[in-house]
């Protein structure tokens, strides 16, 4: 046992700590090395206590949700990786026109969405197919086509860096495409509130059906991946000249540029650029993070060379 493993075990004997836990077992990409300590927590107070302990003792720590948007290094991950699985959800305000609902960050996105639809609320339907949990969706401001989850957020409950639990209103969350303030603030997302209008459950189901069918048609859903590896690219004069079909658009899809660069089906080891959606990379079985990172570099270099734009990762690296 390492010193850290011993220390955490002696302070938190009641927690189900797992040592040298292979993160590839839980990442969507099926890559990633062992975490020195891994733990799933359901209780808010357990999370607060463990994080305070880590901060006081300067222990490297990281919180993950569904691990669908992370690329974990092949080597050992020092410190503690925490998965918060508190999935409580409730209505907090009911008005004639809308309701405010609150969900803990460990709720899975499909459960959050199906519960709101069951309650006759509308707004979140397009996010049913976003894998992972609410905390991860808030962290990266999950989007589907042009709908950003932040457009429905009322406020976010966080554990701040001083160990205080505070609510941050949506306007103060620094939301924009693929971004929230939580990517830089070190705050831990505990829960979020959404303001949702009353809707017709049948119409909501129809929206969900269409979005699910479209995803299945356009994404390699049966294969291990992290969804889009790259963010869409801010449009510019050069791209508008080359690709007039996007002239009115704020962003050019990264998958389109990767495809135009002839990179579909490019391979490194057992990682491949998907031929169904070129912004996706898929693990053909036994692929490693090392291979994935090499392929990411190759794609970035080629797209830069062809179109003069820098692709930015949408995924987050854990090392
Ligand atoms: C097949 C497929 C389809 C996808 N489709 C979409 C899509 O349509 N739209 C979209 O936006 N994304 C999509 N994604 C990407 C991904 O599912 C989303 O970004 C998702 O919201 C990530 O949630 P997660 O719980 O898995 O986050 P994780 O991968 O676990 O974490 C992502 C980041 O968030 C941080 N984080 C997680 N929880 C917390 C918390 N409670 N507090 C603080 N930080 C936290 C982590 O440290 C990490 O840096 C897709 C992925 C796949 C595999």
Image: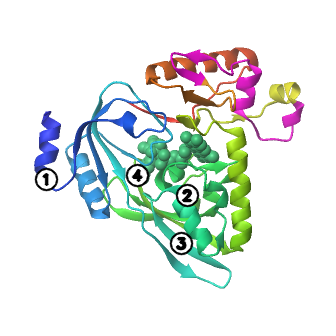
Check the image and report above or below for 219 versus 162.
above
In the rendered image, which quarter contains the N terminus? top left
Query: Percent position (x, y) of residue 101?
Result: 53, 72
Label 3 with label 2: CB-CB less than 8 Å: no
- The one nearer the camera, 17 or 298, is 17
Q: Which mark is residue 187?
A: 4
- SS label for mark 3: strand
Left or right, residue 211 beside residue 16: right
Which residue is at the far bottom? 96
Q: What residue is shown at x 13% (from left), y 53% (from top)?
A: 13
Q: Which mark is residue 101?
A: 3
Check the image and report above or below for 171 versus 58.
below
Query: Percent position (x, y) of residue 90?
Result: 48, 74
Q: Earlier in the sequence, mark 3 or mark 2?
A: 3
Residue stretch in magenta: 244-272
Distance (Cα) linking label 3 and label 2:
15 Å
Q: Earlier in the sequence, mark 3 or mark 4?
A: 3
Distance (Cα) linking label 3 and label 4:
22 Å
- SS label for mark 2: helix
Left or right, residue 166 beside residue 257: left
Q: What residue is shown at x 58% (from left), y 62% (from top)?
A: 113
From the image, state whether disc 1 or disc 4 is nearer to you: 1
Q: Which residue is mark 1?
A: 13
Q: Does residue 39 appear in this view?
A: yes
Check the image and report above or below for 303 versus 79.
above
Q: Residues within 10 Å of mark 3 (few under 14, many from 20)?
A: many
Callout 4: CB less than 8 Å from ligand 1: yes
Label 3 with label 4: CB-CB less than 8 Å: no
Query: Percent position (x, y) of residue 82?
Result: 32, 47
């Amino acid at each position: 046992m390492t010193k850290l493993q011993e220390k955490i075990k002696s302070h938190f004997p009641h927690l189900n700590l797992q040592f040298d836990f292979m993160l590839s077992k839980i990442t969507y990409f099926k890559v990633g090395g062992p975490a020195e300590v891994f733990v799933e927590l359901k209780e808010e107070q357990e999370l607060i206590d463990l994080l305070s302990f880590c901060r006081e003792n300067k222990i490297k720590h990281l919180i993950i949700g569904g691990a669908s948007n992370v690329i974990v290094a092949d080597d050992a991950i020092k410190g503690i990786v925490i998965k918060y699985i508190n999935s409580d959800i409730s209505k907090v305000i009911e008005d004639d026109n809308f309701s405010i609902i609150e969900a803990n960050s460990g709720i899975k996105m499909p459960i959050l969405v199906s519960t709101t639809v069951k309650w006759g609320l509308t707004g979140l339907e397009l996010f049913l197919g976003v894998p992972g949990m609410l905390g991860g969706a808030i962290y990266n401001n999950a989007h589907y086509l042009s709908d950003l989850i932040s457009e429905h957020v009322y406020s976010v409950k966080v554990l701040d860096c001083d160990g205080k639990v505070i609510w941050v209103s949506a306007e103060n969350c620094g939301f924009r495409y693929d971004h929230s303030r939580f990517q830089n603030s070190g705050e831990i997302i505990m829960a979020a509130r959404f303001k949702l209008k009353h809707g017709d459950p049948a119409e909501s189901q129809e929206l969900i059906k269409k979005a699910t069918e479209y995803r299945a048609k356009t994404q390699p859903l049966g294969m291990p991946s992290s969804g889009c590896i790259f963010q869409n690219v801010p449009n510019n004069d050069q791209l508008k000249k080359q690709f007039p079909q996007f002239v009115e658009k704020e962003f050019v899809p990264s998958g389109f540029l990767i495809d135009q660069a002839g990179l579909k089906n490019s391979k490194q080891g057992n990682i491949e650029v998907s031929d169904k959606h070129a912004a996706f990379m898929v693990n053909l079985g036994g692929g490693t993070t090392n291979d994935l990172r090499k392929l990411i570099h190759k794609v970035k270099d080629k797209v830069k060379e062809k179109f003069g734009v820098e692709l930015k990762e949408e995924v987050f690296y854990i090392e």
